[in-house]
Amino acid sequence: MRIALVDDDPNVQRTVEEAFALLAPDWRLESHSPSKEAVQRLAQQPPAAVLLGCRRPKKSRFDYLELLAACLAPVPIILFAASPEGDEILAALAAGAVGCVMKIAPSHQLVRAIREVLQEGTFLCQQAKKAVLEGLHGKGGAASKAQLTPREREICVLALNHTNKEVAVKLNLETRTVNTLLDRAFKKLDIHRREELPGALAHLR
């Protein structure tokens, strides 16, 4: 199975190669610098998944992510983040990423992230979830604009990569309670589909 890494840091490539050799020896890593030529090559021979970890400025990074997502769909793209910044993670999800894992993550978590994305369609590591929650808990007053309660914010973040039933199990709630709170949050955020949730949360910043 081919996994593509789009990053301009050779140390990152070595780290990922070591993780694959240890825990997923049947996976083959191919590395690309973040360029339009790389997008064209990947579009011609799509990999199973893409790890995006380039060090471009945020705006150009998300523009590049959108280009990757548009040209490679339905290939899943995972943000390979250097630091857990909630607004960056939300913006990446809105731009087309389906998950996030930290560059400092242990090998087993990196491999798990890729496997879960391929099997379930999404993955957010604990650091990413925490960063997103902290960003939505009113730092700078962002969350108050949508008047989301702490529980609604928590459910929205979990709903980014879990079904309502899974959220209910994680929070020890009834599924119908999660349904009700998520519906209420959707109304406050003025959205109607789950696919709109990453963008709505990103705009709270």
Image (cartoon, grey):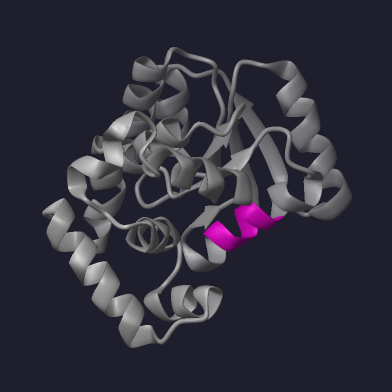
Residue shown at the point (40%, 27%) measured from the top left: 40
Q: Is residue 177 above or below residue 41?
A: below
Res 205 visible: no
Q: Is residue 84 above or below residue 26?
A: above
Whether residue 95 appears in magenta in the rendering, the answer is no
Residue shown at the point (35%, 59%) measured from the top left: 156
Quarter assignment of residue 70:
top left
- Magenta highlight: main SS: helix
The percent coordinates of residue 41 (x first, y second) are 46, 29
Quarter assignment of residue 57:
top left
Residue sitting nearer the eye, 162 or 44: 162
Residue shown at the point (52%, 49%) measured from the top left: 129
Whether residue 115 appears in magenta in the rendering, the answer is yes
Residue range (magenta): 112-117
The percent coordinates of residue 50 (x first, y second) are 53, 41
The percent coordinates of residue 81 (x first, y second) are 57, 32
Residue 113 left/right relative to 171: right
The percent coordinates of residue 15 (x first, y second) are 79, 31
